[in-house]
Amino acid sequence: MVSEAPPFWWTKAGWQAWGLWPFSFLYGRIAGRRMARTRRASVPVPVICVGNFTVGGAGKTPTAIAIARAAKEKGLKPGFLTRGYGGTIDVTTIVDPEHHRAEAVGDEALLLCRETLTVISRTRVDGALKLVEEGVDLIIMDDGFQSARLTLDFALVVIDTFRGIGNGHLVPSGPVRAPISEQMHQLSAILKVGNGSAADQLVRQAARAGKQIHVASLKPRENRAIAGKQVLAFAGIADPNKFYRTVKEVGGLVTETRDFPDHHYFTEDEIADLLDDAEKKGLVLVTTAKDAVRLAGHHGRMEELAKKTSVVDVDMTFDDPHGPVNIIDTAIANFRERRIREANAKKV
């Protein structure tokens, strides 16, 4: 899977997109067939998958965290299952924030484990079984919708309303991970994030197909360290501009910005440039929570950058406060029906 989204993916399709169309056609045939025909393993607890239509972030991780918080309020013991993208560990592992760094387990896993038990696994079936072994009674998958090897009891697809699905083309001529028709068939609900209009067509399509539609927004937490201050904002995420808008929401005066690739590990030169520029110009450094965990646990100038950088945390807030609970309840009901079908199939 392509990890870096070229700029032309997010504009009207031009010669670059159309030039790559034959490769996208082949990719789409393979990806669609794989989604439709993959044999999926069943595990003895409900499974919720939080995914998105495209390569790049749409808010999956904060959405997964919001659902986990609702599950804990219901008295459940949720656990996160993630691939550990960007990490080097290739065996099924329980993430330990006291011992693991982002280089080993990936940045998203370190954010998730702050909330509840988190397992990384290249083989999601093995990871799910590990969570069950640890006493988890609800599995929340962060990503993996298009490549799930588990039977999903609820598939929530998150879409950013400012970027939507970009030019609408499949990889590599666009950001779409698999044919929209197949994704729409397999999802349970769409979570529309923000108040833009780029997702309107897909939301209408999902509504006509009888899918649930949830609406939410990313709400930044108050940050007095940057309110009214001139800041140098930097971000290594899929959509840095979304972060810069968030900094402005909490009162930061964005004087300069630095964009880095998604999941980027900062070099010594990049760290020095950030520190030196901020000091020279009297700017407050500010970044995302995901970037901050990649800076943690190091020494030298990276440790200095971590200490001098303010972090803007965000929460996924559903317009309907009962939205996350409704998703969990539906997943549990679907799980019970699945177990009945499986039991009946064994009798035949």
Image: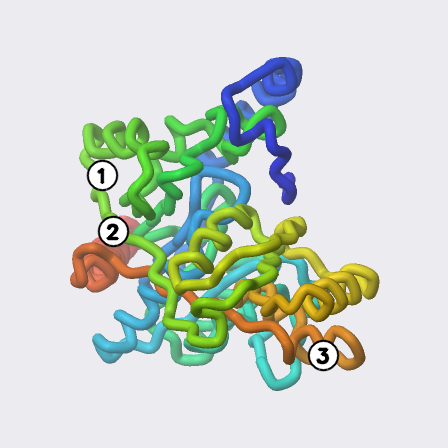
The location of residue 42, given as percent across then percent down, is 40, 56
Q: Please tell me which of labels 3 and 2 falls first in the chain.
A: 3
Residue at 64% across, 56% down: 263
Q: Is residue 240 left or right of residue 136?
A: right
Q: Mark number for residue 341? A: 2
Left or right of 208 in this view: 22? right
Colouring style = rainbow
Which residue is labeled 3 in the image? 303
Q: Residue at x 53, y 19 (%)?
A: 13
Q: Which corner quadrant of the image does residue 120 belong to?
A: bottom right
Residue 117, compared with residue 199, is above or below; it is below
**Element marked by disc 1:** loop
- If you read the primary sequence from the N terminus, does the residue marked by circle 1 or circle 2 appear first? 1
Among all residues in the image, which is located at the extreme front? 281
At label 1, which amino acid type do we have?
Lys
| 160 left or right, relative to 1 | left
Q: Which is in the foreground here, disc 1 or disc 2?
A: 1
Which amino acid type is shown beneath numbered disc 2?
Arg
Residue 329 point in image, percent of width and height? 19, 61
Crowd rating for badge 1 (residues with CA inside 10 Å; few <14, some 14–19, many 20+): some
Q: Quadrant of the N terminus?
A: top right
Q: Position of residue 9 (x, y in %)?
A: 56, 29
Q: Residue at x 33, y 38 (%)?
A: 196
How far apart in space, not on screen, are marks 3 and 1 (Cα)?
46 Å
Q: Quadrant of residue 70?
A: bottom left
Could one spot residue 209 in this view of the protein? yes
Q: Which residue does the numbered mark 1 point to in the structure image?
A: 211
Q: Is residue 139 visible?
A: no
Q: Marks 2 and 3: in contact by CB < 8 Å?
A: no
